């Protein structure tokens, strides 16, 4: 094989999008909230409710926000990376809620690459060869304590 042809084939193979990995995982919110690190970082003053899940009565909405978080996937399983990225997104939403005086983030949806996915129990996560990412969109709210609808 001639050298220029070999170099062209090699360049095409290396740049081929088929080599880029984008595996989709659905991670239960409950499994993230049960992580020991979540118990350290999420103080309980803000509750999280996925769209479609039972939610306390919303007394006041205080704006919405998107949290796009990524983590290094090297040396982690995809599931572990997904949990870390989700926890980072929840921490960001907790901080936003506190700034607005909210005690909850409601109607949380996965919003990866602006594609909205509603699931009452799970969050969509994307794992690549080196990076794992989660994007969440939710509404800050003051909710009634106690009963859910």
Image (cartoon, helix red, strand yellow):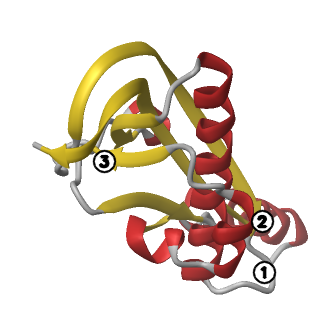
In the rendered structure, the answer to whether residue 122 lies left or right of residue 5 reads left
Pinpoint residue 11: horizontal percent, then vertical percent: 78, 60
Asked whether the viewer can see residue 22, the reply is yes
In the rendered structure, the answer to whether residue 138 lies left or right of residue 13 reads left
Q: Residue at x 61, y 40 (%)?
A: 94
Camera-nearest residue between 60 and 38? 60
Which is in the foreground here, disc 3 or disc 2?
Answer: 3
Q: Residue furthest right?
A: 3
For the residues labelled 1 and 3, the Cα–Cα distance comes to: 57 Å
Q: Residue at x 56, y 54 (%)?
A: 44
Q: Residue at x 41, y 65 (%)?
A: 29
Camera-nearest residue between 84 and 114? 84
Residue 50 is marked as: 3
Tell me if label 2 and label 1 are in contact, CB under 8 Å: yes
Quadrant where the C terminus is found in the figure: top left
Pinpoint residue 141: horizontal percent, then vertical percent: 40, 24
Camera-nearest residue between 104 and 15? 104
Pinpoint residue 75: horizontal percent, then vertical percent: 80, 86
What residue is shown with label 2? 5
Pinpoint residue 89: horizontal percent, then vertical percent: 61, 47
For the residues labelled 3 and 2, the Cα–Cα distance comes to: 53 Å
Q: Vertically, is 75 above or below 141?
A: below
Q: Residues within 10 Å of mark 2 (few under 14, many from 20)?
A: few
Labels in figure, total: 3
At mark 1, the secondary structure is loop
């Amino acid at each position: 094989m001639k050298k220029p042809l070999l170099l062209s084939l090699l360049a095409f193979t290396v740049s081929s999008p088929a080599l880029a990995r984008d595996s989709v995982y659905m991670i239960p919110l409950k499994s993230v909230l049960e992580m020991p690190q979540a118990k350290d970082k999420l103080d309980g003053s803000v509750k999280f409710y996925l769209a479609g899940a039972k939610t306390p009565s919303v007394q006041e909405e205080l704006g919405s926000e998107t949290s796009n978080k990524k983590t290094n996937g090297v040396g982690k399983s995809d599931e572990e990376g997904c949990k870390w990225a989700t926890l980072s997104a929840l921490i960001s939403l907790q901080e936003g809620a506190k700034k607005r005086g909210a005690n909850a983030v409601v109607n949380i949806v996965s919003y990866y690459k602006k594609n909205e996915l509603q699931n009452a129990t799970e969050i969509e996560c994307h794992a690549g060869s080196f990076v794992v990412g989660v994007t969440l969109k939710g509404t800050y709210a003051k909710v009634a304590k106690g009963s859910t609808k």
